[in-house]
Image (cartoon, helix red, strand yellow):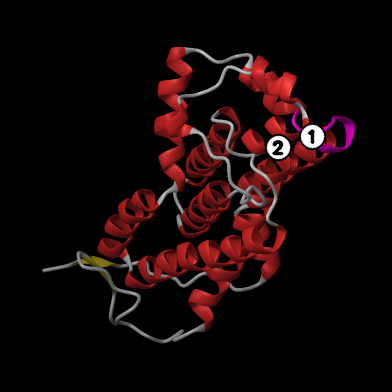
Amino acid sequence: MPFVRRHYVPPSLRFRTFLRANRFFLIGVLLLLAGFLYLLFTNQQGDELIAINALRTDRLDTFFISATRLGEPIAYVVVLLVAVTFRLRTALFAALTGITVAIVAGLLKLYFAEARPMRYFFDNFEDTWHSLNLFDENMRNWGYSSFPSGHTASAFALYSFVCFNVHRPKIAISIACFLLALTVGCSRMYLLYHFLRDVTAGAFLGLLVAIVMFFLQWKLFPDSARLDDGIWWERHKP
């Protein structure tokens, strides 16, 4: 028998209320994007990757190779398994968030067709390419799908959506979601898969998709009691 959520209250759809409720996370992301943009305008393309690559160690390799999976479908599966126990609506739109951001990022990659860092350095700055601490060949990407970073977009979409939907403990969840998304973005640069511009665009795209999906989940079928119940929890029925 499911547990009863006695204080079930749908969120306010006023944008001002949304901003206030998620101010810690949103301020963190906006400051991060502002910092990234500053670096983009004050450095040449690839400078950040060269600096990050110089910090490479075996421990960081292990950490970032694992951390980058936080922006892959397996992370969505974990969130879905948790969300479906509490609210089917959240689980459904978490999945739609992942699908949407994957489609949009994929279309942008096809449109811009920008060279990955490996290809960019090898074709334009071969001396720099030879000076890099390169990963094994099976981890190198020589393609033209650099912009934007799909992993970063996926991570920021997922963890932003999670943050927006969790009410307590808000500050702790905001910090955790921000750090998880940031770690994925950093991993894409550390692994030489993306430039800072790609990560910046991916973070912005992911945040935008998450905001749209958060409001859309309550705009569609707002009175569906079934969607507001989960496998183990259901809202109080007076």
Q: Is residue 236 left or right of residue 94?
A: left
Please name the residue shown 64% across and 42% down the image: 116
Q: In which quarter of the image is residue 83?
A: bottom left
Q: Is residue 31 left or right of residue 85?
A: right
**Tag 1: amino acid:** Gln
Q: In this view, does 109 lie to the left or right of 225?
A: right
Residue 16 in percent (x, y) is at 70, 65
Please name the residue shown 35% across and 75% down the image: 228
Packing grade of label 2 (10 A; few <14, some 14-19, many >=20) is some
Please name the residue shown 61% across and 51% down the image: 145
Q: In this view, does 144 lie to the left or right of 97?
A: right
Looking at the image, is 107 positioned above or below residue 157?
A: below
Label 1 and label 2: CA atoms lie apart by 10 Å
Q: Nearer the viewer, residue 162 or 73?
A: 73
Residue annotated with mark 2: 120
Q: Residue furthest right?
A: 42
Considering the image in quadrants, where does the C terminus appear?
bottom left
Residue annotated with mark 1: 45
The dot on residue 25 is: none
Give the secondary structure at mark 2: helix
Please name the residue shown 56% across and 36% down the image: 188
Looking at the image, is 237 positioned above or below residue 51?
A: below
Give the secondary structure at mark 1: loop
**Mark 1 touches mark 2? (CB < 8 Å):** yes
**Tag 2: amino acid:** Tyr
The span picked out in magenta is 40-46
